[in-house]
Image (cartoon, grey):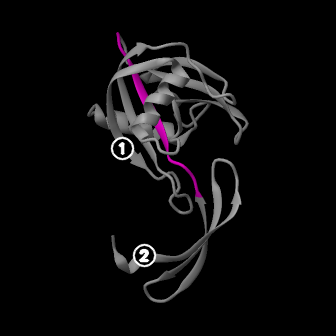
Amino acid sequence: MDERLVWRERQRRVLQRCGIFDVCASERVAGDGREGRFTVLEAPGWVNVVAPLPGPGERFLMVRQYRQGIERTTVEFPAGLVEPGEEPAQAAARELEEETGRQAGRWNRLGALAANPAFMTNWCTTYCAEELSPAFPARPDALERLEVLEVPLAELLAGLGGGELVNPMTVAALFWYLRYRARW
């Protein structure tokens, strides 16, 4: 890290608690003495699970769900928040089971991204879940309504950025997977 660019935090205080994130004021000072007040959203990390399906043709286990922010349905890889005290790998396994009813025999961490590092504190870690097997019926959270889908790779690539394939973390997860499979 280039220390010349770092702003050191002097104080952080919570302005508002908003359920899945806190809005905070952060007072910071730069190496040259400049001072600034910044708004920071403190939020838990989350995970994406790329789950390729066995068999002919490359297909992925995905979910369709309504997203409150854009008031539309989206198609995404299974995903969710990392609970307090939980490691991202544990959250990935839990989310796959809750949203799809599947378990994975093999897991690989594909990468992590800061979704908006300008003002958000959290990271999204992407895992690849392979050797899938049915575990039990899906059991989404109380405020989730999901449809589990099998999406062919060609359809996924063709639809990115339009229709229901508009979540940028789904695009990032697919990138991680293609790089993992040495197709990028």
User: Quick one: 117 or 151, which is closer to the camera?
Assistant: 117
- Residue 136 visible in the current orientation: yes
Tell me the quarter of the image containing the C terminus: top left
Relative to 60, 80 lies left or right: right
> In the image, what residue occupies the spot 42% across and 23% down?
153
Residue at 36% over, 43% down: 111
Mark 2 to mark 1 CA distance (whole Å): 24 Å
Image height check: is 81 above or below 141?
below
Residue bounds of the magenta highlight: 42-55
User: In the drawing, what numbered circle is on residue 55?
Assistant: none
Say if 113 sits above or below 150 in the image.
below
In this rendering, is residue 84 above or below 14? above
Q: What element carries label 1?
A: strand
In the image, is residue 54 part of the stretch drawn in magenta? Answer: yes
Q: Main secondary structure of the magenta part?
A: strand
Residue beneath the point at 54% across and 24% down: 98
Q: Mark 2 points at which residue?
A: 6
The amino acid at mark 2 is Val
Where residue 124 appears, as percent x and y from the top left, is: 47, 45
Q: Tag 2, which secondary structure? A: loop
Picture residue at 29% right of the left edge, 35% below the top: 180
Dot 2 alpha-carbon crowd within 10 angstroms: few under 14, some 14 to 19, many 20 or more: few
User: Label 1 amino acid?
Assistant: Gly
Confirm whether the magenta stretch covers residue 15. no
Query: What residue did someone put label 1 on?
Result: 111
Q: Earlier in the sequence, mark 2 or mark 1?
A: 2
